C-alpha cells in the first residue's frame, strides 16, 4: 500500500489511487514486467517469489499453478493491479496468459478477480476460441460469468482477437493451440505448410481431443 508521508494532517495515511496518479505522473504502473527467482511458497492461488531476498507476493491462476507446480524456481510475467484502496500483484506463467488477462479486464464489468477465475477454468487459447466463435455457453461454464458477461466479452473482444489471428496466424492467442503446434512440427519435418494444415485438419475433424504427439503421428499418416 502506498503511504502519503508528507501530509501535515495525517502522517503515513493511505493515499488514494487518484491522488497518486495526480501527484506522481512519471510513475510507470507496468514497470515490473516479470520477476525471476526461487519459489518460497506455492499454492493454487498464490505464489511468493524470492528475488535476491525480496519476496514478491503474486496472485496466480490454476493455469499458472499447473505450469510451475513442479518447479523450485522460474520466471513469472507480472501485472500490478491498482485500485482505490490498495493493489494486487498478479503473476502469469506465459506472456500469452498475461495478454489474455489484460484483454479480459479491459471489458466493462470484468474485474481482475473474474479474469483470474476465467484463466483458472480455461486456458488462454480456449478462452480466445470461445470468444471468436461466439460460444457464450462455454464462457458461461466458468464461475462468475453469466449470460450478459459472456455476451459482452464476445462483443468487445471478438474483432480484436480475430484481427490477431489474421496478423499472426501461428503465434497469436487464438491459433496458438495444439493444432498450430502440430502444423509447426510438420513444417519442421519438411512438409509443405498447405499439406501440413490439411493433414492436421483431417485429424481434428475426427479426433478433436487428441494429444499433440498423437496428432502429429496421425497427420503424417494422412499425407
Image: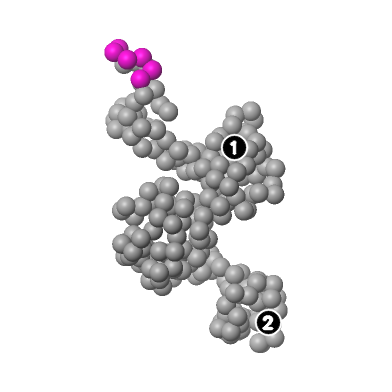
Q: Is residue 206 visible?
A: yes
Characterize the local packing of mark 1: few (<14), some (14-19) or many (20 or more) Cα atoms within 10 angstroms.
some
Q: CA distance from mark 2 to mark 1?
A: 42 Å
Q: Which mark is residue 48?
A: 1
Above or below, 24 against 45 in this view is above
Identified at 42% across, 35% down, the residue is: 87
Would residue 37 be visible to someone looking at this image? no
Please identify the quadrant where the C terminus is shown: bottom right
Image quadrant in which the N terminus is located: top left
Is 3 drawn above or below residue 188 in the view shown? above
Q: Would you say residue 105 sits in the magenta stretch?
A: no
Q: Quadrant of residue 135?
A: bottom left
Q: How is the image coloured?
A: one colour
Q: Which residues are magenta?
A: 8-13
Q: Position of residue 15 (x, y in %)?
A: 34, 26
Instruction: Give the label on residue 218, or none.
Output: 2
Q: What x and y, as percent, mark residue 120?
A: 51, 55
- Residue 121 in the figure: left or right of residue 150: right
Characterize the magenta stretch by its predominant secondary structure: loop
Q: Residue at x 37, y 48 (%)?
A: 111
Mark 2 secondary-structure assignment? helix
Disc 1, SS: strand
Amino acid at each position: 500500500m502506498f503511504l502519503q508521508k508528507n501530509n501535515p494532517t495525517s502522517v503515513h495515511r493511505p493515499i488514494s489511487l487518484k491522488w497518486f496518479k495526480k501527484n506522481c505522473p512519471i510513475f510507470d504502473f507496468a514497470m515490473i514486467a516479470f520477476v525471476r527467482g526461487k519459489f518460497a511458497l506455492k499454492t493454487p492461488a498464490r505464489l511468493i517469489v524470492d528475488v535476491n531476498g525480496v519476496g514478491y507476493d503474486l496472485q496466480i491462476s490454476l493455469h499458472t499453478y499447473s505450469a510451475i507446480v513442479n518447479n523450485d524456481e522460474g520466471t513469472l510475467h507480472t501485472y500490478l493491479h491498482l485500485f482505490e484502496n490498495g493493489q494486487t500483484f498478479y503473476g502469469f506463467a506465459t506472456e500469452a496468459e498475461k495478454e489474455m488477462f489484460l484483454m479480459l479486464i479491459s471489458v466493462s464489468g470484468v474485474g481482475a478477480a473474474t479474469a483470474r477465475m476465467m484463466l483458472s477454468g480455461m486456458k488462454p487459447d480456449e478462452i480466445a476460441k470461445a470468444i471468436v466463435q461466439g460460444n457464450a455457453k462455454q464462457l458461461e461454464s466458468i464461475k462468475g460469468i453469466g449470460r450478459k458477461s459472456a455476451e459482452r466479452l464476445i462483443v468487445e473482444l471478438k474483432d480484436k482477437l480475430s484481427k490477431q489471428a489474421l496478423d499472426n496466424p501461428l503465434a497469436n492467442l487464438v491459433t496458438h493451440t495444439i493444432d498450430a503446434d502440430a502444423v509447426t512440427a510438420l513444417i519442421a519435418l519438411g512438409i509443405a505448410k498447405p499439406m501440413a494444415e490439411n493433414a492436421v485438419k483431417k485429424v481434428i475433424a475426427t479426433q478433436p481431443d487428441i494429444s499433440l504427439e498423437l496428432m502429429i503421428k496421425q497427420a503424417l499418416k494422412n499425407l
